[in-house]
Image (cartoon, rainbow, N blue to C red):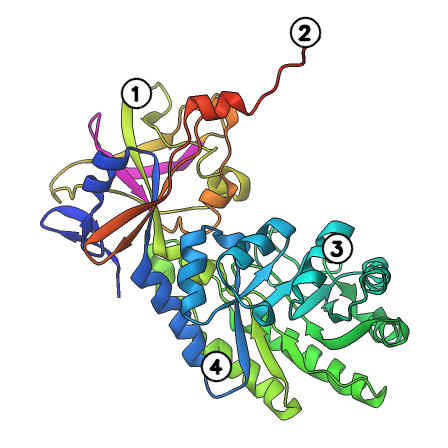
Amino acid sequence: MDYFSYQEGQLYAEGVALSDIAAQVGTPVYCYSSAAIRNQFAMYANAFSGHDHLIAYAVKANSNQAILNMLAKEGAGVDVVSQGELRRAVAAGIPANRMVFSGVGKTDQEMDYALGQEIYCFNVESEPELERLSARAQAMGKIAPVALRVNPDIDAKTHQKIATGKSENKFGIPLASAREVYLRAARLPDLKIMGLDVHIGSQICDLAPFDQAFGIAAQFIRALKSDNIHLHYIDIGGGLGIGYHPDDFAAIPCPADYANLAIKHFSPLKLKIICEPGRSIVGNAGVLLTTVIYLKKGDAKNFVIVDGAMNDLIRPTLYDAWQNIIPVKSVQETQALVKTDIVGPVCETGDYLGLDRMLNEPQRGDHLAVLGAGAYGAVMAGTYNSRLLVPEVLVQDTKFAVIRPRTTFDDLIARDKVPDWI
């Protein structure tokens, strides 16, 4: 189901006109569909329903408290990568036995806080981290549940900045030495070996790399059994990618196909399956609304200058990401198309939302919607050029609420402190 659709010439989120949100909240603004988020989570939950599992939502994709609260009520767990994300999950009411802590650089303070919460498991990514976690567990009188993240050296053919399963990436323990590290973990005090983590990257839209990784993981788990190391779960990583271009959607595997692949490999091993989808839960459940400020015709390029910028949505310039941009007010098919760059006000050449787009020429004050903006949008926003953090809105049926207000200039300036000696 498409939760963003044109109705009577206007783009709607569920039953709310996006032009009404723009008028009441202002732009730029992120808008999310609660029905879309619930539906995507349900697709994963249903796909694994016949097998012991945990759908641990990747908080880094979108960490708004309203979304975490909503997913908590749907039965979601969380995958977190910082103390801040863990505290968000605690505040949202996620039970500790549904929390998995990943990440390559956990500090003592983060370990201590997570141990105090008695989370389900730590995904450990190096021997030094393993040893440090053992020491912190001893110091706190706790038992630290651990899984080792093993790097299978698989090229998932995703963007180089979000690939995590190749030997050149910073993530995980090399497969060649992982068996020895498990034996080391078994000897360290106050650690409880729980599982294996194999996460090969984000925005993967082909099942073949998963099949390869799962096969390697299953073989490795059998080897561990011969070492008398028996695991309770397998963490298969971050779920599926999503379609950004309209032509891509038909080729994206569904959660059921992904789940069946995992179950094929791990059901014979009688392991609980943990899956950590983020982007595929919230990515296509959100849009960024922006307003046209100026039209600028250059010698070599045409520019549509909007009030949304790279500090609001950094994916296009950081990842060379393509996101569909459409008018909030529908246009007539007879209107002429022009090739244009859609750019923001930030003083950087890299400040753009879309390049070389064929667009019906908008007018000043028209609203545009950047689709596929529910993941890695607001969470990566900043205040570069002293711009205000963009607000967020959640829609349910015919109502909406601001779930993060726009900051004020007073708030922005008050964050700085001037020493008395100046």
Identify residue type, mark 3. Glu
Closest to the camera, between mark 3 and mark 1, is 3
Q: Is residue 360 magenta?
A: yes
Q: Residue at x 32, y 32 (%)?
A: 340
Q: Earlier in the sequence, mark 4 or mark 2?
A: 4
Label 1: element kind:
strand
Disc 3 crowd, CA 10 A, few/some/many (<14, 14-19, 20+): few
Q: Identify the residue position indicated by label 4 in the image.
A: 48
| SS type, badge 2 | loop
- Depth-wise, is mark 1 or mark 4 nearer the camera? 4
Image quadrant in which the C terminus is located:
top right
> Toward the viewer: 159 or 78?
78
Closest to the observer: 315 or 94?
94
* Residue carrying label 2: 422
Residue that carries the numbered disc 3 in the rendered image: 168
Q: Answer with mark 2 or mark 1, whichever residue precedes in sequence.
A: 1
Mark 2 or 1: the one toward you: 2
Q: Position of residue 256 (x, y in %)?
A: 43, 79
Asked which quadrant contains residue 416, the reply is top right
At x 33%, y 26%, the residue is 303
Q: Which mark is residue 297?
A: 1
Marks counted in the figure total 4
The answer for how far apart the CA atoms under marks 1 and 4 are is 53 Å
